[in-house]
Image (cartoon, rainbow, N blue to C red):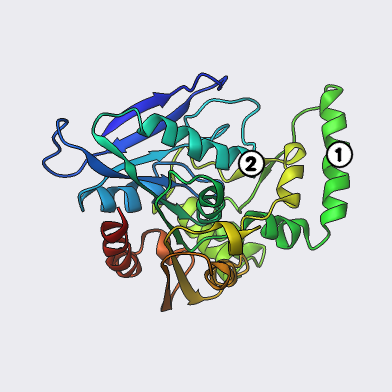
């Protein structure tokens, strides 16, 4: 594995990325490449990198897992901004870097996104036709989630609060950085936060199971306005022409991955090859790192990308 700093000419900051290589890697050859995109509040050292990037590299792909702008080891200030437009632009910038690598075949590039990353990769694929195939693993349309559960189903109220906070910060107030999860499973139980996705997210992000320094599970509240007006799947019926694989778990949680996965699969009517993998016994966060559901997902991801890349 090689860590690199990606600095495009039009960027004021770098993106930090890990490149994982296939067994017997030979720089004189060219390989199909996959870019993996991490969830909201995550980092490249978690599921997008240490699970899906590593698994696909072992199957013969060059895989780039990176930290989003303003997050993890990537640059950008202020920190912890979750801006969907920027997140999608990051994907194009990583592709810009990938096509300069002599061992990457520029005509064989695919994407895998997990959770919010699954929504971002679908959205990027609508207009970024250098992407030849895309897979969403328990993908979430983060715009829909912000308009609903993350705003307590009061998106206009949330926008007014964000506006007031941004004005306060412009006048010198301290930044409001919202923590998305309880600090521990015990704290979640004490507050009665036992809903499946909230509790399982805490189990992943706040325990040694998945906890990493870069996976901060926080957001700068005052800069989240644009998220509420964003839709990962807009124009998918017309623009999502590339092959698409959607992996969902049927154990439903509040973050809506099953719902979003079924929606984009249904709307991907222009895709040359659309596939749905619906795993009956597994949940959203099981697909982050649990060996059995990850193996089931990989059983579909590997032949899908080998057939299209």
Q: Which residue is mark 2?
A: 85
Asked where in the image residue 259 lies, by quadrant, the reply is: bottom right
Question: Could you classify mark 1 by the number of other residues whose Cα lies within 10 Å: few (under 14), some (14-19), or many (20 or more)?
Answer: some
In this rendered view, identify the residue nearer to me: 89 or 154: 89
Residue visible at 21% across and 53% down in the picture: 59
Q: Where is residue 97 drawn, in percent x and y?
A: 40, 29
Residue visible at 37% across and 59% down in the picture: 289
Q: Which residue is mark 1?
A: 163
Above or below, comparing residue 149 to residue 176 in the picture: below
In this rendered view, identify the residue nearer to me: 122 or 65: 122
Q: Where is residue 227 drawn, in percent x and y?
A: 71, 47
Q: Secondary structure at mark 1?
A: helix
Considering the image in quadrants, where does the N terminus appear?
top left
Q: Are marks 2 and 1 in contact (CB under 8 Å)?
A: no
Mark earlier in primary sequence (2, 1): 2
Asked where in the image residue 21 lies, by quadrant, the reply is: top left
Q: Secondary structure at mark 2?
A: helix
Visible residue check, residue 82: no
Cα gap from disc 2 to disc 1, whole angstroms: 19 Å
Question: Could you classify mark 2 by the number of other residues whose Cα lies within 10 Å: few (under 14), some (14-19), or many (20 or more)?
Answer: some
Q: Where is residue 23 drawn, in percent x and y?
A: 14, 44
Describe residue 178's horizontal placement relative to residue 5 as left or right: right
């Amino acid at each position: 594995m090689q860590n690199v700093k990606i600095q495009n000419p039009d960027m004021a900051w770098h993106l930090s990325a890990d490149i994982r290589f296939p067994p017997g890697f030979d720089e004189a050859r060219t390989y199909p490449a996959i870019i993996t995109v991490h969830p909201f509040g995550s980092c490249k050292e978690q599921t997008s990198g240490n699970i899906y990037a590593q698994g696909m590299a072992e199957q013969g792909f060059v895989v780039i897992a990176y930290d989003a702008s303003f997050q993890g080891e990537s640059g950008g200030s202020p920190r912890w901004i979750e801006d969907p437009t920027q997140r999608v632009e990051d994907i194009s910038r990583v592709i810009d870097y990938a096509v300069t690598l002599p061992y990457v075949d520029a005509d064989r590039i695919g994407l895998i996104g997990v959770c919010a990353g699954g929504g971002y990769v679908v959205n990027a694929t609508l207009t970024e036709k250098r992407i030849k195939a895309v897979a969403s693993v328990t993908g979430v349309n983060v715009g829909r989630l912000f308009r609903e559960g993350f705003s307590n189903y009061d998106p206009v109220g949330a926008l007014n609060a964000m506006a007031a906070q941004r004005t306060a910060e412009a006048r010198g107030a301290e930044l409001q950085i919202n923590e998305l999860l309880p600090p521990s499973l015990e704290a979640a139980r004490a507050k009665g936060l036992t809903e499946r996705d909230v509790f399982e997210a805490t189990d992943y992000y706040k325990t040694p199971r998945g906890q990493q320094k870069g996976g901060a599970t926080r957001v700068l509240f005052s800069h989240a306005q644009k998220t509420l007006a964003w839709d990962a799947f807009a124009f998918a019926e017309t623009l999502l022409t590339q092959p698409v694989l959607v992996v969902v778990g049927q154990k439903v949680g509040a973050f809506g991955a099953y719902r979003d996965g079924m929606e984009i699969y249904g709307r991907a009517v222009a895709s040359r090859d659309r596939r749905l993998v619906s795993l009956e016994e597994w949940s959203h966060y099981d697909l982050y790192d649990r060996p059995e559901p990850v193996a089931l997902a990989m059983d579909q991801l590997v032949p899908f990308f080998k057939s299209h890349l």
